[in-house]
Amino acid sequence: MIWGDESWNLGFFYDFFNDPLSSCWILENTNSAQPIVGYGLQSLLHNESSITNLALHPSQWGRGLGGLLLRHMIKHARLTCAVRMSLEVSTSNERALKLYFNHGFRISKLLPKYYGSSDGYSMILQL
């Protein structure tokens, strides 16, 4: 189910799904041999909704599905009375950065060596 070299291990998902303040959103194509084409994970802590992961199968890139999923996550954050959303993203992930900027996220700080040898950004969206 996980694509690419940024895969999460099964233990992470087990812990995440057992947290009552966490949500998982799945994009599904029931006409496909591989029905799960994307997912988003978010959790709520106090008044902040954190995007833990947003992933699409590479075959689905460029079809607007990332934006669809992100807008759903933003709507959910508002419904849970979050006042902001946060996430971390690699500085080299241009596709994700464009998606987040287009939906109003702004860089709040640089995270040196956050992804091992590469840097990350912490990003915030005020709701």
Image (cartoon, rainbow, N blue to C red):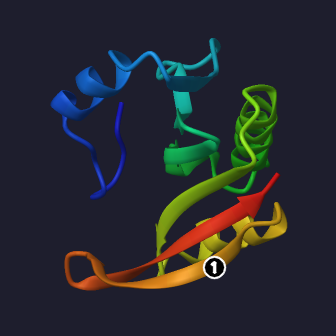
Q: Depth check: give the residue in front, 81 or 50.
A: 81
Dot 1 surroundings within 10 Å: few (below 14), some, or many (20 or more)? some
Q: In the image, what residue occupies the spot 54% across and 33% down?
A: 39
Side of 52 relative to 72 (left or right)? left
Q: Point out residue 101 in the picture as x, y percentages from the top left corner.
A: 76, 71
Side of 33 relative to 77 (left or right)? left
Q: Point out residue 19 in the picture as x, y percentages from the top left corner.
A: 37, 20
Q: Point out residue 95 in the picture as x, y percentages from the top left corner.
A: 62, 70
On the image, which quarter does residue 71 sit in? top right
Q: Which residue is mark 1?
A: 107
Q: Is residue 38 above or below residue 67?
A: above
Q: In the image, what residue occupies the spot 20% across and 29% down?
A: 10
On the image, which quarter does residue 68 sit in? top right
Q: Is residue 94 above or below residue 8?
A: below
Helix, strand or loop under label 1 = strand
| The N terminus lies in quadrant | top left
Q: In the image, what residue occupies the spot 61% across and 42% down?
A: 49
User: Count the marks: how many?
Assistant: 1
Q: Point out residue 12 in the picture as x, y percentages from the top left corner.
A: 24, 34
Side of 99 relative to 108 (left or right)? right
Side of 81 relative to 38 (left or right)? right
Q: Is residue 16 above or below residue 100?
A: above
- Residue extending farthest front: 46
The amino acid sitting under disc 1 is Ile
Q: In the image, what residue occupies the spot 70% across and 37% down?
A: 73
